[in-house]
Image (cartoon, rainbow, N blue to C red):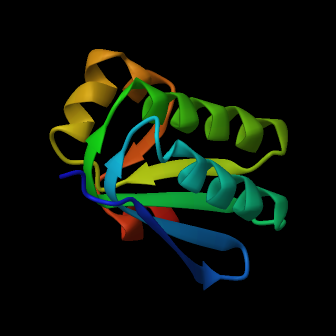
């Protein structure tokens, strides 16, 4: 049984938004993260942090959403940061060299510093 994807929105302060992502990110649920990420980017934040400590699986469509949100953020002058990636998700990100494109942080606190 697939673990349902959840995205919880939390603000660290007026300039930052943290999206906490939990479950499995695959083609059937990418719209959940896509919509939450786009809404956060449209809200006027300076920094968007994706807290991925609860993400247990990510396929290529999930990676596509990370890249898409990165490009949208970059176009708007917003910093997109991914925090707390753990295997198997961190492994997939590294294998396809997205760790060279995306800003990765060991903790949410580090991403907000």
Q: In x, y percent, where is residue 40?
A: 71, 63
Report the residue at 64% width, 83% height from top: 13
Instruction: Tell which of 26 and 66 is nearer to you.
Output: 26
Q: In this rendering, would 4 be left or right of 80?
A: left
Which of the 4 quarters of the picture holds residue 71?
Answer: top right
Q: In this rendering, would 31 be left or right of 77?
A: left
Report the residue at 84% width, 65% height from top: 44
Q: In x, y percent, where is residue 75?
A: 82, 36
Report the residue at 52% width, 66% height from top: 19
Taking 63 as reference, is 31 above or below it? Answer: below
Task: Look at the image and tell me whether residue 49 can be seen.
Answer: yes
Q: In this rendering, would 22 be left or right of 76?
A: left
Q: In x, y percent, where is residue 57?
A: 25, 43
Which of the 4 quarters of the picture holds residue 77?
Answer: top right
Total numbered labels placed on residues in the image:
0
Instruction: Tell which of 100 and 18 is nearer to you.
Output: 18
Instruction: Tell which of 30 and 88 is nearer to you.
Output: 30
Report the residue at 49% width, 34% height from top: 102
Taking 36 as reference, is 78 above or below it? Answer: above
Which residue is the extreme one toward the top? 96
Task: Look at the image and tell me whether residue 46 can be seen.
Answer: no
Q: In this rendering, would 76 be left or right of 82?
A: right
């Amino acid at each position: 049984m697939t673990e349902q994807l959840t995205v919880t929105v939390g603000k660290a302060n007026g300039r930052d938004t943290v999206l906490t992502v939990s479950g499995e990110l695959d083609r059937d649920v990418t719209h959940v993260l896509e919509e939450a990420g786009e809404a956060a980017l449209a809200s006027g934040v300076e920094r968007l942090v994706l807290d991925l400590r609860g993400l247990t699986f990510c396929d290529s469509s999930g990676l596509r959403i990370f890249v898409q949100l990165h490009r949208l953020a970059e176009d708007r002058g917003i910093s997109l940061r991914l925090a707390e990636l753990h295997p198997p998700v961190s492994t997939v990100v590294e294998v396809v060299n997205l760790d060279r494109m995306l800003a990765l942080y060991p903790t949410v606190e580090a991403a907000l510093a």
